[in-house]
Image: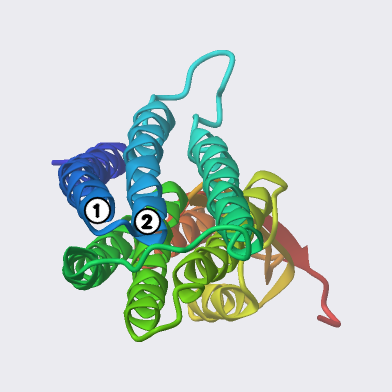
Amino acid sequence: MVSKNEKKNDREIKDRDLAMKVSTVSIVVNVFLSLLKLLAGVIASSGAMISDAVHSASDVFSTLVVMAGVHLSGKKPDREHPYGHERFECVASVILSVVLAATGLGIGFKGIENITGAASHQLEIPGIPALIAAVVSILVKEIMYQYTKNAARKINSGALMADAWHHRSDALSSIGSFAGILGARLGFPVLDPLASVVICVFIEKAAIDIFRDAVDKMIDKACPEETVEKMREVIMSTEGVIGIDEMKTRLFGSRIYVEVEILMDSSKTLVEAHNTAETVHDSIENEFPDVKHCMVHVNPAQPEE
């Protein structure tokens, strides 16, 4: 018979394997796109496409950070870290957000530099290869965003979700590149560097969102109210539970810890109280796979209660 701990360990191993598989695919795709965009940008004389290539190249580094975070977060608890290492994923997400923000600022400053210098020199008109590369990038990156996002939701990985948004920001930057290149070819050369500035804004927004999510998971933020309410319903449906005196939840990396004080008839025996508490514990951990541990305390109900 497989124990509860063995089931949890098997799930964590499968989650880690899925994250590594998705990350490996991301690296291969990003290397291909980076080279394609860089080549197209150089051949077609497109600053926006070269900026886009740099953004895709940064994705390779970010994915390596994700892989390191997932690997470290999967380490078993030890004497120095009895609650596990899940917060390494949050650290990876923070690093990703900083890298993403720095990349976006670099692209934005380069675009502004080209715009302000447009009066002193003739801006080149981007060629057709840049347009083709932009379309390919938009399609591939949106597919990668959906693929990575679905995997992140399946295993509740903040670092993997951050990487998914890195793909989405790359898709958005490619849309900006396409618009800028097309505008430049229609007679408005300044739209090509202007697209880099727009790309910068999208990237900074994604970086801020990733950073805020990681910080929330590092400071023991409570679960969303709807999740807590569902947990209450599961607990109150347990035979023998009269009420809930207190309930606390906290996010620990990608996992959840629950502490609940249930109310029971004071005439119940110690064995009966223990069995009910065990049922509540098992129900919460079974119904909510992201719950790493549920601590249940039993309070005796007074006659008036």
Residue 258 in view of the camera: no
> What residue is rendered at 40% in x and 40% in y?
62
Q: In the displayed structure, does residue 22 sit left or right of residue 258?
A: left
Measured as percent of width and height from the top left, residue 284 is found at 46, 63
For the residue pair 276 and 3, the one nearer the viewer reads as: 3
> Sequence-wise, which precedes: disc 1 or disc 2?
1
For label 2, count other residues whose C-alpha is less than 10 Å away and answer few (under 14), some (14-19) or many (20+). Answer: many
Q: Quadrant of the C terminus?
A: bottom right
Q: In the displayed structure, does residue 59 sit left or right of residue 42?
A: right
For label 2, the residue is 52
Measured as percent of width and height from the top left, residue 275 is found at 47, 55
> What residue is rendered at 28% in x and 37% in y?
9
Residue 96 in view of the camera: yes
Which colour assignment does the render follow? rainbow
> What residue is rendered at 63% in x and 65% in y?
119
Q: In the displayed structure, does residue 6 sit left or right of residue 120?
A: left
Q: In the displayed structure, does residue 38 sit left or right of residue 223?
A: left
For label 1, count other residues whose C-alpha is less than 10 Å away and answer few (under 14), some (14-19) or many (20+). Answer: many
Q: Residue furthest top?
A: 79
> What's the CA distance linking mark 1 and mark 2?
7 Å
Using the rendered view, name the quadrant where residue 149 is placed: bottom left
For label 1, the residue is 37
